[in-house]
Image (cartoon, grey):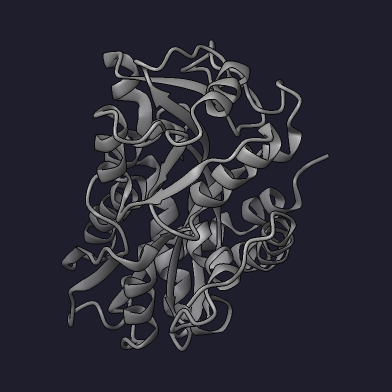
Amino acid sequence: MTDPRRRDFIAGIAACAAAVAAPPAWAQRGPIRIFVGFPAGGLPDLVARAIAEQFKRSFDIAAVVENRPGANGRIAGQAVKNGAADGSLLLIAPASGMVHLPHVYNDLGFDPMTDLAPVAQLVENDFALAINAKLPVQTLKEFAQWCERNPSLASFASPGTGSSPHMMGLQIAKALGVKLTHVPYKGSNLGLADVIGGHVAAMVAATTFFNQPVKAGTLRLLATTGKARSAVLPEVPTFQELGMPQLTLVEGTWLLAPARTPQAVIDKFSAAAIESLKSREMLAVLDGQTTAVPLGPRELGRLMREEFDRRGASIRSIGFTAAE
């Protein structure tokens, strides 16, 4: 059966193409600013930069990416909430920033469901559990045994409290029946450095993020959260294969705008962003683990509501208590 989200997208593709052709009325004012709540080099940043290049081509206007890392993306989210709703300001965020954070913080400073408007989803990715290659561990089962023998060293890094990798790490610990101490970082790169350096035992992050250190032999992947094995890493099993289907998770990277942004402007942004999937910049991001799964504003809005409810239930199931 055809996915209704995909069917809706196909039905609207002609309208999207027409919207790209006409620059928005504010095009002469520029520039378009795209905020990213994480450091340069991560998946949200790479997607944002590919979209910015497409906006320049589509609208003949300057488009810049502004990295505002900190507080697991909340700083950028607050800035976009309070920014001008005239098409000059956008946000690129992982789904976790919109559907996890409201369940793990008492006060984000913004409500993703009411203060931001969905524009487009471009890509999806899965996650992986990676360990320092020097650990005497080859499989997920051996990792669980190592954690039991070394409780003071059993830790995992994530790119921030409340992120999907953070929640996934807690769920992995629960599924394995071990205790893993969470070590949050302001972005994936900082956490990766400490795992490679042997200061933290493991890390959960987007699978594609681990490609280079795995090739270099500094990290070993034990399992991924994908629905099937990666064509790029066929030797790495999925958690589902290992008898843990509850650890299956794919996550989108989303483009959003201030809630008061006119729908006509949102539709033009959405069409141009989806057009970017054909660009050389975005094709460099699509590596077989990060895949193109385009959704327009209406389809993304439905997905946001569904994921908000589903992930809230998942977070409650591990007993995580909202902070701050």
Please say if 233 is above or below 268.
above
For the question of whether residue 285 can be seen, the reply is: yes
Please say if 207 is above or below 26.
above
Residue at image point 30% right, 82% down: 25
Q: Position of residue 48 (x, y in %)?
A: 31, 55
Number of marks: 0
Q: Quadrant location of residue 299?
A: bottom right
Most foreground residue, 66 or 275 = 66
Q: Position of residue 241 (x, y in %)?
A: 71, 21
Residue at image point 69% right, 54% down: 318
Residue at image point 22% right, 51% down: 40
Q: Residue furthest right?
A: 1
Most foreground residue, 241 or 160 = 160
Please say if 263 is above or below 4.
below
Q: Position of residue 207 (x, y in %)?
A: 45, 32
Q: Quadrant location of residue 78?
A: bottom left
Q: Is residue 265 left or right of residue 79?
A: right
Most foreground residue, 47 or 222 = 222
Image quarter where the N terminus lies is top right
Q: Is residue 281 left or right of residue 107?
A: left
For the question of whether residue 297 can be seen, the reply is: no
Residue at image point 52% right, 58% down: 96
Q: Position of residue 258 (x, y in %)?
A: 42, 82
